[in-house]
Image (cartoon, grey):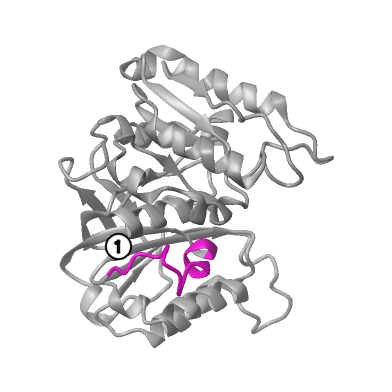
């Protein structure tokens, strides 16, 4: 990555770093200190000032400390004075265990913006469901260990940067309905979503927001295509997918690795099948640049957004006034 000059506009931004799930680990289960320190150093090169929470380096079994310790650090990160952003070190598993331990009345009044993805989707969605607060779906500390230029440019939105509309070429699967294949089509809705496994796991719980006429974005990693289908069916059968105006599909790395024989499930077949079960008015658009990939956009969760489709391209915008600050 370039050194500080490229992102000097972030100089002095204080970022609270905490561990709601587990640590960077080596293959033998030891804490990967070198990876953490490399990520922190790259944050500093961007002008950021990491503020490490008290229990950041704890390890209790699989998790970065007990549930109570991790929940306390999360609460502190979101309520510390003079902090510009709260950001976890990584995802993994453990965030859903913390949701019942958080003081949602306090978090409703907190002002610190928060960003994360993967397992952290549970907090993004629960925060919106419980308080109506928006948050950011985007890079965590681990993303800075080997940062991508596009990801850094889009990450600036958390500090008020204006990188412009998020535009991409959408793929051929799932097949768009006839009415959406030509001309210009625009729609608006509440932007929300995240990791598919986490979204589907929250169905029926108080942690999943009830969003109608929304723009739902989804991604996952190392989930076989048939498992992606099963999770999408959970959302479909719960009536969640048909209540949206659009479903934006990000990266699903590894989904086709379990392909074993001709006719076996592939990601394209899964998307086409789900598309066939949805009303034509609900768009499914692939290719959104986000997921467990370096080339990752930062997206707000819980704000009004505008989606435009034209000639194989898509564009997503949201109002700066309504975004998270």
Question: Measured along the vertical axis of the image, is residue 251 above or below residue 36?
Answer: below
Instruction: Name the residue rendered at 40%, 65% in the picture.
Output: 208
Horizontal placement of 183 versus 125: left or right?
Answer: left
Q: Residue furthest right?
A: 28
Location of residue 211 (image quadrant): bottom left
Task: Answer whether residue 11 is visible to the viewer in this image.
Answer: yes
Measured as percent of width and height from the top left, residue 148 is found at 49, 33
The verdict on residue 275 being magenta is no
Instruction: Name the residue rendered at 35%, 44% in the picture.
Output: 107
Measured as percent of width and height from the top left, residue 92 is found at 62, 49
Main SS, magenta residues: loop
Question: Measured along the vertical axis of the image, is residue 15 above or below residue 322?
Answer: above
Task: Decide which of 23, 304 is in the foreground and name it.
Answer: 23
Number of numbered labels in the structure image = 1
Question: Measured along the vertical axis of the image, is residue 174 above or below residue 58?
Answer: below
Instruction: Report the quarter where the C terminus lies.
Output: top left
Task: Decide which of 152, 16 is in the foreground and name it.
Answer: 16
Horizontal placement of 143 versus 131: left or right?
Answer: right
Measured as percent of width and height from the top left, residue 13 is found at 36, 20
Rate crowding at label 1 as few (under 14), some (14 to 19) or many (20 or more) other CA atoms within 10 Å: few
Instruction: Name the residue rendered at 36%, 14% in the picture.
Output: 12
Task: Answer whether residue 1 is visible to the viewer in this image.
Answer: no
Task: Decide which of 151, 177 is in the foreground and name it.
Answer: 151
The verdict on residue 209 being magenta is yes
Element assignment for label 1: loop
Mark 1 lies on residue: 312
Q: Which residues are magenta?
A: 197-211
Measured as percent of width and height from the top left, residue 220 is found at 54, 59
């Amino acid at each position: 990555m370039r050194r500080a000059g490229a992102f000097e506009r972030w100089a002095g931004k204080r970022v609270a770093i905490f561990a709601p799930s587990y640590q960077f680990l080596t293959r033998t289960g030891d804490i990967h200190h070198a990876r953490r320190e490399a990520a922190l150093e790259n944050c500093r090169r961007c002008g950021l000032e990491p503020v490490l929470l008290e229990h950041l380096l704890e390890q209790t079994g699989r998790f970065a400390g007990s549930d109570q310790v991790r929940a306390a650090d999360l609460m502190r990160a979101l309520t510390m004075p003079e902090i510009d952003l709260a950001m976890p070190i990584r995802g993994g598993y453990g965030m859903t265990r913390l949701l019942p331990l958080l003081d949602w009345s306090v978090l409703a009044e907190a002002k610190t913006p928060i960003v994360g993805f993967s397992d952290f989707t549970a907090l993004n969605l629960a925060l919106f469901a419980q308080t109506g607060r928006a948050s950011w779906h985007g890079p965590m500390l681990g993303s800075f260990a080997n940062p991508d230029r596009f990801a850094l440019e889009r990450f600036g939105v958390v500090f008020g940067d204006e990188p412009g509309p998020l535009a991409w070429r959408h793929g051929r699967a799932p097949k768009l309905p006839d009415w959406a294949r030509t001309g210009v089509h625009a729609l608006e809705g509440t932007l929300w979503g995240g990791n598919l496994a986490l979204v589907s796991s929250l169905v029926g719980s108080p942690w999943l927001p009830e969003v109608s006429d929304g723009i739902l974005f989804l991604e996952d990693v190392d989930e076989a295509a048939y498992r992606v289908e099963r999770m999408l069916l959970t959302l479909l059968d719960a009536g969640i997918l048909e209540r949206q105006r659009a479903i934006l599909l990000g990266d699903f790395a590894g989904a086709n690795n379990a392909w074993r024989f001709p006719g076996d499930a592939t990601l394209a077949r899964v998307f086409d099948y789900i598309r066939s079960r949805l009303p034509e008015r609900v768009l499914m658009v692939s290719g959104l640049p986000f997921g467990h990939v370096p080339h990752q956009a930062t997206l707000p969760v819980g704000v009004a957004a505008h989606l435009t489709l034209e000639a194989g391209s898509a564009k997503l915008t949201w109002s700066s006034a309504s975004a998270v600050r």
